[in-house]
Image: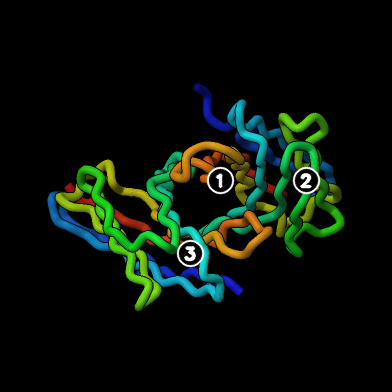
Amino acid sequence: AQKVTQAQTEISVVEKEDVTLDCVYETRDTTYYLFWYKQPPSGELVFLIRRNSFDEQNEISGRYSWNFQKSTSSFNFTITASQVVDSAVYFCALHSGAGSYQLTFGKGTKLSVIP
Amino acid sequence: DTGVSQNPRHKITKRGQNVTFRCDPISEHNRLYWYRQTLGQGPEFLTYFQNEAQLEKSRLLSDRFSAERPKGSFSTLEIQRTEQGDSAMYLCASSARTGTSGVRDTQYFGPGTRLTVL
């Protein structure tokens, strides 16, 4: 069975602070994919990143960075110098299991960036 | 390049009525997915189509739910005899079977249809 845990339900930071969103996953498969999505108040899920289980290199995209560690089954997401526009619910998701295409989502972390 | 579109965006219905939602995927995507999201939760998988074939269904998809993708393009999700517990956001996503490894099978979501059952 697959499971994604996002232990932080809500986080508030002051603008320009750095913030890290935690994601821990469970799967028995050796091949799997991890994702982060952003859901702003408008409701549409916006794709941010996809990583496969064989690529543990950290990734940076502008103010966003991701730290993938198989040893701890974690795929954490850091926003540097947060901005008000970063306020949203962020979901971590897992795709694993040959023949299955469903994503298993965590419950999400609501990030509020205060000006 | 347009994204995934869903109609209607909002639907209010009375308990016991039938409702139908439509999803139009990204044009070159042959894989289509339906999810349901309730307040404070992450999306939960309902069903998956590859072209017109429905290949995977969740146990969440009760007998009152039916999904179709008749010509492998748009899809419809119908809920019969709606119940208050069906109130949720219904999300559609699509993905491409081919492409670079960073793109293939990444699911792109539509804006969702918010259903309220009174």
Q: Which amino acid does the dot numbered 2 rest on? A: Lys
Q: Quadrant of residue B85?
A: bottom right
The disc placed on residue B14 is 2
Q: Which of B49 and B18 is in front in this view?
A: B49
Report whether B92 appears left or right of B47.
left
Q: SS at mark 1?
A: loop
Distance of mark 1 from mark 2, alpha carbons?
Answer: 37 Å
Q: Which amino acid does the dot numbered 3 rest on? A: Lys
Colouring scheme, one of rainbow, by chain, secondary structure, one colour: rainbow
Residue under the point 57% across and 56% down = B43
Earlier along the polypeptide chain: callout 1 or callout 2?
2
Distance of mark 3 from mark 2, alpha carbons?
Answer: 29 Å
Marks 3/2 in contact by CB < 8 Å: the verdict is: no
Residue B28 location (% of width, % of height) = 61, 28
Marks 1/2 in contact by CB < 8 Å: the verdict is: no
Mark 1 or 2: in front is 1
Dot 3 alpha-carbon crowd within 10 angstroms: few under 14, some 14 to 19, many 20 or more: many
Q: Is residue A45 above or below residue B27?
A: below
Q: Which amino acid does the dot numbered 1 rest on? A: Asp
Q: Which of B80 and B68 is in front in this view?
A: B68
Mark 3 or 2: in front is 3
Q: SS at mark 3?
A: loop
The disc placed on residue A107 is 3
Residue B60 location (% of width, % of height) = 73, 62
| Residue bearing mark 1 | B105
Residue under the point 61% across and 26% down = B27
The answer for which chain carries disc 2 is B
